Amino acid sequence: MPSNFAASFSRVALSATIRLMEKKLKLLTYGCQMNVADSERMAGLLQQIGYTLTDDFDAADLILINTCCVRATAEDKVFGQIGRFKALKRLKPSLILGVTGCMAQKEGADLIKRAPHVDFVLGTGQTSEVARVVESLERERRHVVDTSNVSGEIPTEVFPLRGGQVSTFVPIMYGCNNFCTYCIVPYVRGRERSRPPEEIFAEVRQAVAEGFKEITLLGQNVNSYAGGMTFAELLTACDKISGVERLRFMTSHPKDLSDELIDAIANGQHICEHIHLPVQYGSDEILRRMNRVYTVEKYLRLVEKIRAAIPNVSLTTDLIVGFPAETDENFSETLDFLRTVKFDAAFTFIYSKRSGTPAATFTDQIDEATKHRRLDELMKVQNEISLAKNSALIDSVVEVLVEGASKTDEKIFTGRTRSNKIVLFTHCDERAGELVRVKLTHAQTFLLKGEIVRA
Ligand code: SF4
């Protein structure tokens, strides 16, 4: 990373250049936080060759679709979207249309065969090439497909064009080595590569200098960070960076969450008391078929340890229903598991068959009606738990990081507690990025409401 002075000097020069030759970029991002972070990095690279962001498809000189393929529905959405751009390209032949991300990695040249109006396809290891490819297409129009190196080098010297104004993401590693049998990620994002700590610290300092108060360190499994220090050491070092008000991380694989990390959270100053700990299922038989490498009992012991060490910690999780061979008995074990752990919230998904993964070849797939019935039941149980957990917080006073006006009423502001719960409160003169104290007065399943407490 260049020094702060060099960085700000080059940015001044950069903004002067941009004013001279402004071109418009419309960026569409699907999928997870990792994709959001990748999009911000690509936008930063494209800014360096004169592109500024627009919301207007008609004004765009470049449309970039950063894709996800974790579920079939995400892929269908992208293909639908790409199809709609055909007419736009007919009206404006100079428009460049590019597809990047996980689906680009998976489909490669087949994507161009299916949609020849797409100009370029870049896989997950080639996102740092985006500006070079776009510049070459500005000079000479042809199809470019590069998915050659799924475990490609992590780009350095990138200045992400960050969205939002309070919270932002800093990737610490890319890829995954775990090969859960349902998951396409290791195939489309490659093996684990960790960024050096100094680069991560520099990026956190850069985000703070841009005014961000809350930083989330990102990786498919942050606990296996291997950049020359442990993840707990990295987190503790980021906690000490001046100006970081809140520090979060995701995602943690339960098999790798260490005692050292639990201690780091318990003793950290700005490290938030929230752990997203995807369990995926609540029965050993299915966990084994998923290749999750832990048992229900081991997970429960980990939860006990976390709750003993970190008072008021909130725990959230991911769950998949309808995995091949799931029986009514497996499913009812999972409901019992939910009632035992009492997660603050759970992100629940129907199993989606992804070709190329081992689970797609399992013969005992579950029918759609059963999957949907089980999902409804699972959500009903979890929603009751979430409401009970939120209701238990009524009358307490919590620290809220203000995010801004709510989408539906500008007199109501929204923010999050350290435990990552959404809080709505009546706005007085607070600003986005401020930490305020709120007395909680009402609880709903997915949010809390309250009043600002002065002094
Ligand atoms: S840990 Fe499992 S679910 Fe998570 S990205 Fe890796 S393979 Fe996919």
Image: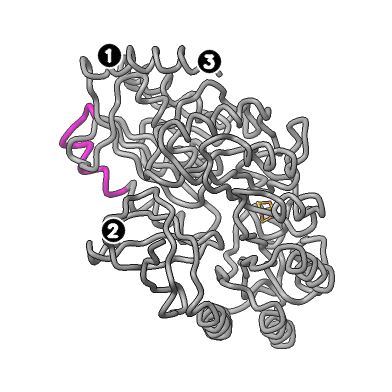
Residue 93 among magenta residues = yes
How many C-alpha atoms fall within 10 Å of the one at disc 2: few (<14), some, or many (≥20)? Answer: many
Query: From the viewer's perspective, is residue 238 above or below residue 422?
Result: above
How far apart in space, not on screen, are marks 2 and 3 (Cα)?
36 Å
Report the coloring of the rendering: one colour
Quarter location, residue 424: bottom left
| Residue 31 screen position, x and y as percent | 48, 52
Element under disc 3: loop
Q: Residue furthest front?
A: 455
Identity of the amino acid at label 2? Ala
| Residue 426 screen position, x and y as percent | 29, 67
Residue lying at 82% horizontally and 54% vertically, measured from the top left? 259
Element under disc 1: helix
Query: Does label 1 or label 2 sit earlier along the sequence?
Result: 1
For the residue pair 444 and 286, the one nearer the viewer reads as 444
Q: Are marks 3 and 1 in contact (CB under 8 Å)?
A: no
Instruction: Please provide the residue range marked out in magenta.
Output: 83-95
How many C-alpha atoms fall within 10 Å of the one at disc 1: few (<14), some, or many (≥20)? Answer: some
**Mark 2: is the Cβ under 8 angstroms from ligand 1?**
no
Q: Which residue is mark 1?
A: 17
Q: From where the camera sits, is residue 382 visible?
A: yes
Residue lying at 77% horizontally and 34% vertically, measured from the top left? 229
Mark number, residue 168: none
- Image quarter (top left, top right, bottom left or bottom right) of the C terminus: bottom left
Identity of the amino acid at label 3? Pro
Mark number, residue 2: 3
Q: Main secondary structure of the magenta part?
A: helix
Q: Which residue is mark 2?
A: 405
Which one is closest to the eye, mark 1 or mark 2?
Answer: 2
Residue 355 among magenta residues = no
